Amino acid sequence: MNRSTRVLLLAIMIALMLLIAAFNWINLSEAYGSGPPYYSRTTNMDKWTNPLPVLAVVDVFAVLAIALLALWIRRAGRN
């Protein structure tokens, strides 16, 4: 694997991390709101769902994808 391919894959890895961080931030700020204690959540409490289980699953898959990509970059660099 040449150097430009490794740099491109590293950039993809960083972009994936930033996208996951933005996804988490957006979902948590929407769920818990910005007003006095959890304003968005208490307005329609019957319709509110906890976002943490979904975010945990997304984060686990993202960590696995990033780890596999890092492993692939490392192994390809040895050859």
Image (cartoon, rainbow, N blue to C red):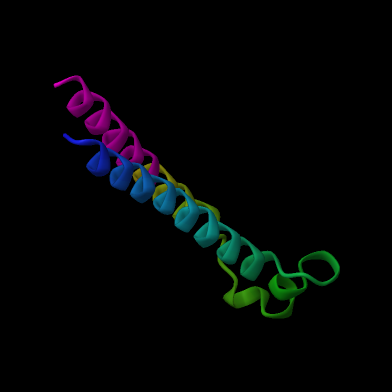
Name the dominant secondary structure of the magenta segment. Answer: helix
Q: Residue furthest bottom?
A: 44
Residue 34, by quadrant, is bottom right
Q: Quadrant of the N terminus?
A: top left
Residue 78 rendering spot, x and y as whole percentages: 19, 20
Toward the viewer: 64 or 39?
64
Residue 10 rendering spot, x and y as whole percentages: 35, 42
Indicate whether residue 63 is drawn in magenta: yes
From this view, report whether residue 40 is shown above or below residue 50: below
User: Which residues fall within the magenta stretch?
Assistant: 62-79
In this figure, what is the number of numbered marks?
Answer: 0
Q: Residue furthest top?
A: 78
Residue 47, by quadrant, is bottom right
Residue 5 rendering spot, x and y as whole percentages: 23, 43
Toward the viewer: 26 or 57?
26
Q: Residue at x 45, y 48 (%)?
A: 17
Q: Residue at x 74, y 73 (%)?
A: 42
Residue 22, by quadrant, is bottom right
Residue 67 rendering spot, x and y as whole percentages: 33, 34
Q: Quadrant of the C terminus?
A: top left
Indicate whether residue 23 is drawn in magenta: no
